[in-house]
Every structure is written in C-alpha cells, then in structure tokens.
Image (tube, grey):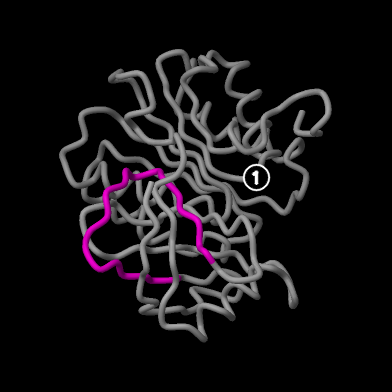
Amino acid sequence: MNTVNCDVTAVYRINGEVVRVQLQTPEPVAYQAGHYLELNIPGESFCYFSIANAPGTRDIELHMQLTGVDSRSVRIVDWLENHDEVAVTLPLGNCTLSDLPQENGPLLLIAAGTGFSQIKAIAESIMHKTLERPVHLYWSARTVSGLYMADLPETWHRADPNFHFSAIISEHNDWQEKQGLMVNAILEDFDNLEACQAITCGSPAMVYATLDGLIAHGLRETHMLADVFDYAPRDQNNGWS
C-alpha cells in the first residue's frame, strides 16, 4: 500500500449524476483490477473509490455518484475541480480475480449504478486477452441514463462473443424488491449457478440481497467477492439482512 501524489487531469460529468475523474501518477503504480483507493482530501474522511481502469499505465479513473446539493460527493468533486494535485492511498481491497479460487466456469460481474467502475476495470483487464471462460456482466440502474457507459460493454461483446452484457432497469429503491429482477436476469442465462463465480459491486443492501438470491440457485457463498463483505459485514445488528 502506497500514498502517491497524483495530478488531477480532468473532472467532468458523464451525465447529470455521474462524474468521471482522471488522475495521473508520476509513474505506473502496481495494483490489480478490482482494487480501490482512498483520496486524501482535507476535511473529508473515508473517501474510497473503486479504480475504474485496468492497471499498467500512469492513468487512474474514478466514477463518482452525485447524491445531493450539499452532499459529501459534491464537496469532493468541488475540491478536485479546484486543485491540481491530490494524494491517493492504494491499492486497497480483496476483490480481484486472484482472490477467487482458480476455476474455468462462468464469471458473473454484477454491478449497480457506479459499482460499474470496479467491474469496468476487471472487464478491461480480462479483455486484454482472449477469454478462456464465459463472462457475463449484469448492470442494474433505476433509469436508462444510470447506465452511463452502456456502449462500452456492448463494444466488449462485439469484440469477443464469450463476453455477454445484460442491463436491468428498475425504479424500485428497495433492493429486497429489486433483487428478483437481478436474479431472474442471471437465471435467464443459467439453470444452476454451482459452476459460477461472481464479483459484485454496489451498496450493502444490493450485495447481500443478490448473494442470498444467487445462493438459493446454487452459487457457492465462497465464490462471490464484494468489498462490502469487508467494510459492512452482515450480522444481526447492522441491518443488511
């Protein structure tokens, strides 16, 4: 884990709710697709964001969801827009392909909203080589505009027919209600999930609802990764069940 000073090279809105931030390190930094970082911004704490691009260059991409007029996300974006440099601490997390048991069954990449950022880095890393296993990306959003880079996974599918993309749109806020749509979309591709592995990125409610739904159809619990398991472990008191 290192702390590195990065140049802030671009901050712009992909749409009305999602901001794309581009940073550049003095030299390439070692991390794996699926890792996240912490922005060290004065006055703000726990500024954790998934790295949205595959490693190997000096560039670091972040996706930020704007959540309100005076929200922390707005303050962070404001700060970045007004500074040329930011210190980041990386790599963080245990949600990379090397953290899964080595198998050749289908890999499910499951994202909600800007959870796509983590999945994007993993997919980019995978797409740098010929796919040796089927990869299925499921991306959920409340509206079509929430799929703010939908053209990109479509491009991956055209580049390799072993890569598949499904979009799930629902106005439901409650993930207990929405979970059925996600699980049903996955079951359209699989009768049983025992051979599958999954990497999931979203809110704790989304991750645990999806985990429960997939386990009910054969997924082995140890074959799903999510950063949520570390920072919001489920127990009788935290409300994620």
Q: Is residue 165 magenta?
A: no
Q: Secondary structure at mark 1?
A: loop
Name the residue located 38 percent from the left edge and 24 percent from the top edge. Answer: 100
Q: In the rendered structure, which segment of residues is drawn in magenta?
A: 21-40
Q: Image check: 109 left or right of 203?
A: left
**Residue positioned 54% across, 38% down in the render:** 227
The C terminus, quarter of image: top right
Residue 115 in sight from this viewpoint = yes
x%, y% of residue 99?
38, 27
Q: Position of residue 83 (x, y in %)?
A: 48, 83
Q: Is residue 157 visible?
A: no
Residue 203: x %, y % from top left:
65, 45
As drawn, 46 above or below 228: below
Q: Nearer the viewer, residue 185 or 29?
A: 29
Specify whether 80 is left or right of 152.
right
Q: Which residue is mark 1?
A: 203
Q: Is 19 on the left or on the right of 66, as rendered? A: left
Q: Nearer the viewer, residue 211 or 41?
A: 41
* Residue 66 occupies quadrant: bottom right
Disc 1 residue crowd, few under 14, some 14–19, many 20+, Cα 10 Å: many
Q: Position of residue 110 (x, y in %)?
A: 50, 39
Q: Residue at x 46, y 34 (%)?
A: 199
Residue 36 is one of the magenta-drawn residues: yes
